[in-house]
Image (tube, helix red, strand yellow):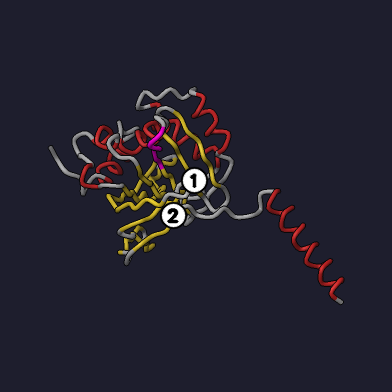
Amino acid sequence: MNTHKNIICCMLTMLSLIWGGLGYAKPTPPFTFIGTPSAYTVAGESIPIYPQAQITLPDGRLVDLCFSGKGLRQKWMAIIKVNAFVGIHYLENPAVLNIEDPMNSLSQQQYRMMVLQMMQNVTPEDIRAEFDDAMDANGVNLNSPELNALRKEITFSLKSGERAYFIGYRNPNDSFENLMIFTEKKLINERGSTLVTDIWSGWFGIPVDREMAVFKKSLLSQAIKN
């Protein structure tokens, strides 16, 4: 009897390893949210906004972040303006974020996170195009090795209601900017000399269109002025 149980256990273990190797195992979220959330209602949908978040870096360090702003990104699809996604932003020290020069003030932050909750279904091509357009408006070199590597990793789609989490951080022992992207389907880790700055420029830099300008203004509604 014990022999049969051992065989069954071995088979289950092998199946688990095989399915995990094929990419079916869900990645572990590198973050937790803390505190009592407030409700942000968009088109009848209530989105929880937590006051704090804690991220877990690949080396095991835990970093506390605080909510710094939220916004609704709208886009034109043909002749209709739709709700594309909601952005929820967290920073190590939100008080440093400056409404007059957000990108420079962000450069003083070691850790940050942007949560994007989809309001529409999007394909990998949609995701890549959104970032390419926004970064191109900010003069980013779209052919840099790190961005090319990142594009190859963006193979997932997202349905309405699903989230993508972008975590940017710097290690104390090197000058690289590290980026983690988490979805329930995939965890991406990339780094580059300006990778996080490039990605964040799409949200806090020069707006690619009028709707992105509104999104940026909303994200900065709690920021300080000079």
Nearer to us of marks 2 and 1 is: 1
Q: Position of residue 65 (x, y in %)?
A: 33, 51
Q: Which residue is mark 1?
A: 58
Q: Viewed as shown, does residue 52 lie left or right of 154?
A: left
Residue range corresponding to the magenta coloring: 168-173
Q: Residues within 10 Å of mark 1 (few under 14, many from 20)?
A: few
Residue at image coords 20%, 46%? 95
> Which one is in front, 56 or 37?
56
Q: Please tell me which residue is depicted at 30% across the width and 37% down the height of the picture.
A: 204
Residue identifier under label 2: 31
| The C terminus - image quarter | top left
Secondary structure found at label 1: loop
Q: Residue furthest left?
A: 226
Q: Amino acid at mark 2?
A: Phe
In-front residue for pair 88/215: 88
Q: Is residue 11 left or right of residue 54?
A: right
Q: CA distance from mark 2 to mark 1?
A: 11 Å
